[in-house]
Image (tube, helix red, strand yellow):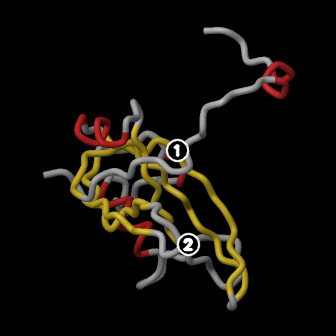
Amino acid sequence: MGVFDPTKFLESTTTDAGSTARNPVPAGEYKATIDDLELRTANTKNGERQILRVIWEIHDEGAKEATGLDKVTVRQDIWLDLTPAGNDLDYSKGKNIGLGRLREAVGQNNAGEAWNPGMLKGAGPALLVVIERPDERSDVVYNDVKSVGQLS
């Protein structure tokens, strides 16, 4: 494999049209592991909120064939509940349910055991329920993770 040359790229010419969407993962249940994590901030009408984006890698040959990708990933966004001071996760009753379900699915939701969010990277496998969500303004179809559970 060669080395990418940015200068050559900026001067290159093509007659090929570029893809504008990727083939979605067919709706269904899949075995998956957590490939990566991203943290982002969203501005809402109630102020800033933190979102943990979980990038799942699906381990399914049918999904690979349907998407045409060697590595099939879907994203799950989990809105985080923070303490009133805003500097820690809120573990009180009814808070961070999505995060609790994620941790439960990958075997990391055990009282008395030390845990930190970085431990999620590479965790699993878990059972994902993936759905398709058509874009209202185009013919693009997105994937959403509807739920996450333990593999039986």
Q: Which residue is identified by label 2?
A: 80
How much space separates mark 1 and mark 2, taking CA atoms? 17 Å
In the rendered image, the quadrant that contains the N terminus is top right
Instruction: Give the residue at x 29% y 42%.
Output: 63
**Can you give x and y, in whole percent of width and height, for residue 17 in the image?**
60, 38
Place of residue 97 in the rendered image (x, y in percent of width and height, measured from the top left):
41, 75
For the view shown, which residue lies furthest in the top direction?
1
Amino acid type, callout 2: Leu
Label 2 SS: strand
Q: Is residue 71 left or right of residue 20?
A: left
Instruction: Judge depth for marks 1 and 2 and give the one in front.
Output: 1
Residue identified by numbered label 1: 36
14 displayed left or right of 23:
right
How many C-alpha atoms fall within 10 Å of the one at disc 1: few (<14), some, or many (≥20)?
some
Residue 30 position, x and y percent, is 24, 49
Q: Secondary structure at mark 1?
A: strand
**Residue at point 53%, 54% (across, down):** 117
Q: Is residue 138 above or below residue 113?
A: below
The residue lying toward the viewer, choosing from 70 and 120, is: 70
User: Which one is in front, 112 or 77?
Assistant: 77
Instruction: Locate residue 9, reporting x and y percent.
Output: 78, 24
Amino acid on which the number 1 mark rests in the picture:
Asp
Q: How many neighbours does mark 2 have within 10 angstroms: few (below 14), some (14-19), or many (20 or more)? A: some
Camera-side residue of 86 and 152: 152
